[in-house]
Image (spheres, rainbow, N blue to C red):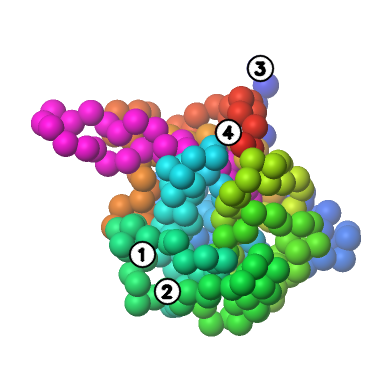
Amino acid sequence: MAHPPDSALIADLRERIELLEGRSTSKREALPFGVETIDRHLPGGGLAMGALHEVAGGGNGAVDGAAAALFAAGVVARTKGKVLWCVTRQDLFAPAIAQVGLSPGRVIYVEAGDEKAVLEAFEEGMRHGGLGGIVAEVAKLSMTASRRLQLAAESSGAIGIAIRRWRRHTEAADFGQPTAAVTRWRVSTLPSRRLPVPGVGRPRWLVELMRCRGAEAADFEVEACDAKGRLSVFSDLPDRPVPARAWKRSAAG
């Protein structure tokens, strides 16, 4: 009977390869999600600090795009210090990110003129070293740009999240291209849990870990971030990962 790959063993092998290639082998700190089934799956027990991560909505719709932004906000809400959030246009709904634990007083907004300027501000923020997290909304992310961001993150120990956000259908294909990001996530909304009384239950998400250095892809069905940026598993589901789904949908959804 085949056994699932051991994440710790894979991480160790990757570290040895990096050593042979002359790259840094220093162990990164990790930011746990606080959800055992996710943290157990990720090398280091959480989302790697000193690293670049990518997240996108599961489709082209604004609802999944908003879920991706809230997922990112929940991550950086659990860090300490100021958060730099870089956009090309200020359409971020601050009360929504406050509801997932990222208070407006912690966020420094950078409204840049175009994506090139956003990436420059993103990289500067990553190199700063005094920020809790750096978030940037970009449609395209090249391998060259992502390598620069990853190196900047490694030098400062900061966590950076690139929210892939596209306004044209043709831009969605770029999300499938390789980058230097350590993890790549996709977030889609699920129906809320039915309440015994009229009302709307806590939002639920399908969180897909599409790529991760040192770990296999996996899907997790979770309840959306609470007021402290924490995810949780459904109380009516067992605490285990959902088998990774094939690419049923393209990056465009």
* Foreground of the two, 229 or 167: 167
Q: Earlier in the sequence, mark 4 or mark 1?
A: 1
Q: Which residue is mark 3?
A: 1
Q: Residues within 10 Å of mark 2 (few under 14, many from 20)?
A: some
Q: Are marks 2 and 1 in contact (CB under 8 Å)?
A: yes
Q: Is residue 22 left or right of residue 211?
A: right
* Label annotation for residue 253: 4
Q: Residue at x 67, y 21 (%)?
A: 2
Regarding mark 3 in the picture, which secondary structure is present there?
loop
The amino acid pointed to by label 1 is Ala
Q: Three-letter amino acid code at disc 2?
A: Val
Residue 63 picture location, percent across and down = 43, 42
Q: Is residue 153 above or below residue 186?
A: below
Measuring 46% from the left and 77% from the top, which residue is drawn there? 108
Task: Identify the residue shown where x is 42% and y is 37%.
Answer: 189
Determine whether the residue tagged by mark 2 lies in a helix, strand or loop. strand
Q: Give the label on residue 94, or none.
A: 1
Q: Which residues are magenta?
A: 183-209
Q: Closer to the observer: label 2 or label 4?
A: 4
Helix, strand or loop for disc 4: loop
Which mark is in front, 3 or 1?
1
- Give the distance between the C-alpha atoms of the residues marked 2 and 1, in whole angstroms: 9 Å
